[in-house]
Each structure stands twice: as structure tokens, then as C-alpha cells.
Amino acid sequence: MAWWFRRRSEPDDEVVSVRLPASHEVELPPDEELAELTAGAEQGDDVAMGNLAAVLHRKGDRAGALHWWGRAWEAGNVVAGFNLGMQHAATGDANRAQVIWEKAAALGDPDAMLGLVKQALDRGDAAGVERWAPVILAQDEAFPITALGVAFRDRGDLARAVQAFLRAEELGDGYAMEYRARILAAQGQHEEAAALRARAATAERML
């Protein structure tokens, strides 16, 4: 089982750049399975550590979740590092999140790169945006590219938003198609928007 890789959005929600599963989507394992998971984590299995952290987070044990995500990150698990940074960001410790995400981004994690871009956008740091946005666009995982487009769109930069959505569309993401269709419709290009929505209806929603 792998509960901890990424949060899925609801069908009508905006894409979110969070690998941590939504709490209602994390099924608590039976006691026997949880015991095995805990044993694996205590024996140094970094995947078990990450999964255990997600379960503890689901149960409301933030301290326990932080402990095991921290252990998994120390063991070299990049996704656990992203989740750990996400937890610090959620509690207002942006500096600590940035330090972790910079290390995870340097190891190639596109979601950590996205976290850094969002931080840079929030503080008006153009250099920070330019450091990571092109790297996100150059990789082949649609989710962070679409989420990058959403971040640009929400800050009024439609040109860069469309650039990101087009790149994600190349990878087949229906979310990106739907988001770009909304922009086209808002600009009065209704036929183009309708055609793109028709494509989105049959495309995969990549999360």
C-alpha cells in the first residue's frame, strides 16, 4: 500500500499540488497491518516510514507524522521530504519548508520545485520563479506542470499559465485542457473553448 504519494482532488476542484492524500481518502489499515507497517518503519524501510506517517496524519497525530516523514526524508526518500516541507508550510514555517524543498528539488522532485515557485510568487521573487518554473515545464510529469499553470493563472499571468497548460496538454492531461478552455471562454473564444472541453471530457485527469 502507498497512501502517501499524492493528494487527489475532487472532480470539480482545482488541481492541488499536494502529494499528501486527503484525509478522507486514506483508509486506516487493520491493526495487524498497522503493526507490520510500524515494524517495517522501525526496521528502516523508508517507504513504510512514509506510509506510517500518512496513517498517523489521518489519525490526527501530527507529531508522529512529522517524526516518520522526517525519518524517511533522512533515509533519502524525496517524496517524504516534500510532504515534510508541506507540513511546515501549512503551519506557517515557510523558511523551514523552503530549506527542505530546495534539497528535494535539487534531487529532481517537481512538486518540491512547485512549492518553491509558489513561495517565490508569493514574495515577488522573479529570480526564484525563473530558477524552477522552466525545470518543471521540461520534465514529463503532467501534474506539477498543470499546477504551475494554475499558480500563474491565479496571479493573473495568463501568458505563462497558458504556456504551462499547453505543455501539460501535450502529456494528455484533461485538467490542463479544461483550465485553458476556461481562459479561452473568458476571452470570448467560445468555439475553441468548446472544442477543448470536448477533448478534456475523454482525456485522462492526471494526478
Image (cartoon, rainbow, N blue to C red):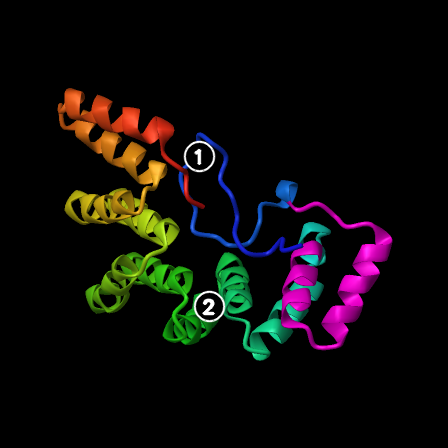
**Which element is circle 2 on?**
helix
Taking the spot 63% from the left edge, 64% from the top edge, the residue there is 50
Q: Which residue in the structure is indicated by mark 1?
A: 13
Residue at 16% across / 20% down in the picture?
A: 191
Q: Quadrant of residue 119?
A: bottom left
Q: Nearer the viewer, residue 197 or 63?
A: 197
Circles 1 and 2: CB atoms closer than 8 Å: no
Percent x, y of residue 194: 23, 22
Residue 65, label in figure? none
Does the magenta run of residues contain 38? Answer: yes
Q: Nearer the viewer, mark 1 or mark 2?
A: 1
Where is mark 2, residue-wise? 97
What predominant SS class does the magenta segment belong to? helix
| Left or right placement of residue 81 versus residue 133 in this view | right
Q: Kindly identify the amino acid type of the residue bearing the numbered disc 2.
A: Ala
Residue 92 horizontal side relative to residue 33, left or right: left
Q: Secondary structure at mark 1?
A: loop
x and y percent of residue 87 in the render?
Answer: 54, 61
**Amino acid type for the residue under numbered disc 1:** Asp
Above or below, comparing residue 110 to residue 204 in the picture: below
Q: Residue at x 81, y 63 (%)?
A: 36
Q: Which quadrant of the rendered structure holds the N terminus?
A: bottom right
Q: Earlier in the sequence, mark 1 or mark 2?
A: 1
Residue closest to the eye, 203 or 42? 203
Range covered by the magenta-colored residues? 26-55
Farthest residue in the right direction? 32
